[in-house]
């Protein structure tokens, strides 16, 4: 009897592991099916007037890649970002006709790099006609509203999750999250009011 019960317990454990592994495998397949895939090749960037962005501000890892099949070596960003859409559209409309002397438009701009500022980002573009470089902020840096970092930490506190849960949530939606040190800084700001 004792061996039989032990055998059943072992079988149940293996069944659970198979079920959990099957669920995880299905989740990974679903995520991969619904994400854009690109060939990733790590590159290092030189210092430019836009700043040094060979490393991600939060993790120290480069987030820019080159599509290896492209002859123009267009740079691409990985993941998703949080964006103030009206602010971004306003900035893009200004960039669309940035220099009438050379008849430049948005199609002449090439992406150079991303500078991450916690959850906010600045994108640097260079015009291939007038050779000027432009920053495009994804969120307003000065506004009457709470900044994006404080908002996220305040939201996490209000629903009762901590850094690990918030980080896992952001990873599941493929948005680079705050470092633990930055999160702690904003957590202190939220608690002070």
Image (spheres, rainbow, N blue to C red):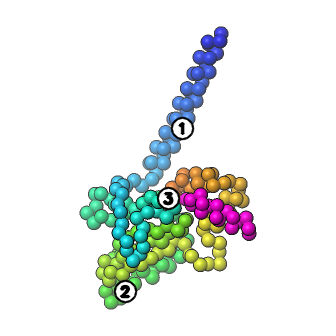
Disc 1 to disc 2, C-alpha distance? 54 Å
Which is more N-terminal, label 3 or label 2? Answer: 3
Quarter of the picture containing the N terminus is top right
Determine whether the residue tagged by mark 1 lies in a helix, strand or loop: helix
Residue 89: give x, y in percent of width and height. 49, 75
Which residue is labeled 1 in the image?
23
Disc 2 to disc 3, C-alpha distance? 36 Å
Residue 67: give x, y in percent of width and height. 33, 59
Q: Is residue 18 above or below residue 128?
A: above
Image quarter of residue 187: bottom right
Which is more N-terminal, label 3 or label 1? Answer: 1
The answer to whether any part of residue 147 appears in the image is yes
Seen at 30% across and 64% down, the residue is 73
Q: Nearer the viewer, residue 183 or 92?
A: 183
Image quarter of residue 93: bottom left
Looking at the image, do the residues carrying marks 1 and 2 touch, with CB atoms under 8 Å apart? no
Q: Nearer the viewer, mark 1 or mark 3?
A: 3
Quarter of the picture containing the C terminus is bottom right
**The magenta segment:** 177-193
Relative to residue 73, is residue 122 drawn left or right? Answer: right
Q: Is residue 121 magenta?
A: no
Crowd band around label 1 with a 10 angstrom C-alpha radius: few (<14), some (14–19), many (20+): few
Q: Is residue 128 above or below residue 121?
A: below
Q: Main secondary structure of the magenta part?
A: helix
Q: Nearer the viewer, residue 2 or 71?
A: 2
Determine whether the residue tagged by mark 2 lies in a helix, strand or loop: loop
Seen at 46% across and 62% down, the residue is 56
Which residue is labeled 2 in the image?
99
């Amino acid at each position: 009897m004792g061996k039989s019960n032990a055998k059943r317990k072992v079988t149940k454990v293996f069944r659970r592991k198979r079920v959990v592994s099957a669920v995880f495998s299905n989740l990974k397949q679903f995520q991969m099916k619904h994400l854009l895939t690109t060939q990733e090749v790590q590159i290092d960037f030189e210092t430019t007037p836009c700043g040094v962005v060979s490393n991600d501000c939060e993790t120290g890892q480069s987030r820019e890649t080159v599509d290896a099949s492209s002859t123009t070596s267009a740079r691409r960003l990985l993941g998703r970002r949080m964006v103030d859409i009206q602010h971004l559209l306003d900035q893009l409309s200004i960039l669309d006709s940035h220099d009438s002397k050379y008849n430049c438009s948005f199609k002449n701009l090439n992406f150079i790099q991303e500078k991450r500022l916690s959850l906010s980002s600045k994108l640097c573009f260079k015009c291939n006609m007038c050779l000027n470089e432009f920053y495009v902020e994804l969120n307003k840096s000065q506004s009457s509203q709470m900044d994006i970092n404080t908002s996220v930490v305040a939201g996490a506190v209000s629903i009762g999750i901590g850094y690990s849960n918030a980080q896992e949530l952001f990873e599941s939606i493929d948005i680079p999250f705050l470092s633990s040190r930055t999160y702690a800084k904003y957590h202190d700001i939220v608690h002070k009011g």
